[in-house]
Amino acid sequence: MTEIGLQLFSVREKTEKDLVGTIRKLASYGYDSLQFAGFFETPAEELRAVLEEEKVKVAGVHTGLHQLQGSELEQTLQFNETIGNDLLICPVLPKQMRGTGDDYKQTAERLNEVGEECRKAGFTFGYHNHNWEFEQYGGKTGFDLLFENTDPELVKMELDCYWASYAGHDPAEIMEKYKNRCISLHLKDMKMESGNKTSTEIGTGILDLNQFIETGKRNGVGWFIIEQEDYDRNPMDVAKDNLENLKKQLK
């Protein structure tokens, strides 16, 4: 089943000031799923109440590795269970965990451990890429070192199509290689501005998002997540238009 959501980092200035109000506004735009990138001290019970009231599902939560280990793990799992989330995604690795090929292999072991703890508690664990994972280390990318050295049952993939494309790799080829391991796509378009690549509204840039979407559907991707990081107008207005544009492409 195809589900559309918004990564709330796209409207981070709004969520930092008023997470609950922003959820209500996005629900009024037609968003019935949201992916979180921080809770800004909002209690879990209050968050669950507004999600239930607005009939909004949680499309995963970006969660730092430190929150999934040691003393913080139980608190993290309890919070997510309360809000009805069962998908935890590592959004970024600290530099010391991705400096060399050996670093990536050691990090893969750590991700396996985190994934096992998540699975025991009834959660799915995934990893979200940027562009730097596609640097080469002895003939392999950091991305491949991570996913070739992790258990497909323990560490899933949230493929950021923009950042993979930014690094010169084809997201469709990555999905075909890893098949149903990819459970979520981050979708944002790309434009060239003064010789630099920047993210732009869905359907207005140079990426073949239709191909990514169709390949995702064919390989069992369940979540299609809108995200945008660069703006030339109000991010909330952009989020509203991106939803309509993605719905058109999904048809």
Image (spheres, rainbow, N blue to C red):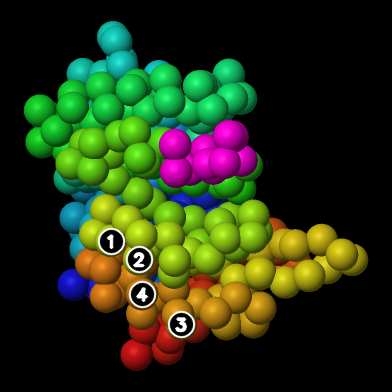
Q: CA distance from mark 4 to mark 2?
A: 7 Å
In the picture of the structure, the residue carrying the numbered disc 4 is: 215
Q: Position of residue 163 (x, y in %)?
A: 58, 55
Q: Which mark is residue 176?
A: 2
Q: CA distance from mark 3 to mark 4?
A: 8 Å
Disc 4 crowd rating (10 Å Cα; few below 14, some 14-19, many 20+) is some
Q: Quadrant of residue 167?
A: bottom right
**In this rendering, is residue 207 above or below 90?**
below
Q: Quadrant of the C terminus?
A: bottom left
Q: Amino acid at mark 1?
A: Lys
Determine whether label 4 and label 2 are within 8 Å by CB.
Answer: yes
Determine whether label 1 and label 4 are within 8 Å by CB.
Answer: no
Horizontal side of 100 relative to 120 (left or right) equals right
Q: Quadrant of the N terminus?
A: bottom left
Q: Position of residue 103 (x, y in %)?
A: 51, 22
Horizontal side of 206 relative to 161 (left or right) equals right
Q: Which mark is residue 179?
A: 1
Determine whether label 2 and label 1 are within 8 Å by CB.
Answer: yes
Q: Over which residues does the magenta segment extend? A: 136-145
Going from N to C along the chain, the mark reached first, 3 or 2, is: 2
Q: Position of residue 12 (x, y in %)?
A: 56, 48
Q: Quadrant of residue 186?
A: bottom left
Going from N to C along the chain, the mark reached first, 4 or 2, is: 2
Identify the element where label 3 is drawn: helix
